[in-house]
Image (cartoon, helix red, strand yellow):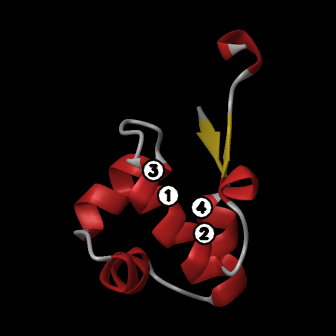
Amino acid sequence: MKNTIKVERAKKNWTQAELAKVIGISRQGLNSIETGKFIPSTVLALRMAKAFDTTVEVLFQLEDTEG
């Protein structure tokens, strides 16, 4: 699964720590999501989408090989 979190964060000039605080996780946890090492829960993905005022589909996309 790929994501656009880093791009969306840059648009808002937020650090990982700032976004992590807004969505209620650690900076390390956010880094794991950004780098694709961890796939967030539905609730967490929805919190991220709300923080960016966008949809989950904008933030997360399946890789071509994932169907």
Circles 1 and 2, Cβ within 8 Å, touching? The answer is: yes
Picture coordinates of residue 17 (x, y %)? 33, 80
Q: Where is the N terminus found, in terms of image quarters? A: top right
Whichever of labels 4 and 3 marks the residue nearer the N terminus, that label is: 4
Q: Secondary structure at mark 2?
A: helix
Whole-number angstrom distance, CA of label 2 to CA of label 4: 9 Å
| Quadrant hosting residue 39 | top left
Residue that protrudes farthest toward the front in the picture? 43
Picture coordinates of residue 9 (x, y %)? 60, 75
- Which residue position is annotated with label 2? 49
Whole-number angstrom distance, CA of label 4 to CA of label 3: 15 Å
Q: Where is the C terminus found, in terms of image quarters? A: top right
Q: Is residue 2 left or right of residue 36?
A: right
Residue positioned 71% across, 64% down in the render = 55
Picture coordinates of residue 45 (x, y %)? 49, 57
Whole-number angstrom distance, CA of label 3 to CA of label 1: 5 Å
Circles 4 and 3, Cβ within 8 Å, touching? The answer is: no
Whichever of labels 2 and 4 marks the residue nearer the N terminus, that label is: 4
> Mark 2 belongs to which amino acid?
Ala
Disc assigned to residue 5:
4
Circles 3 and 1, Cβ within 8 Å, touching? The answer is: yes
- Which residue position is annotated with label 3? 42
| Quadrant hosting residue 5 | bottom right
> Mark 1 belongs to which amino acid?
Ala
Whichever of labels 1 and 4 marks the residue nearer the N terminus, that label is: 4
Whole-number angstrom distance, CA of label 1 to CA of label 2: 6 Å
Whole-number angstrom distance, CA of label 1 to CA of label 4: 10 Å
Disc assigned to residue 45:
1
Q: Nearer the viewer, mark 2 or mark 3?
A: 3
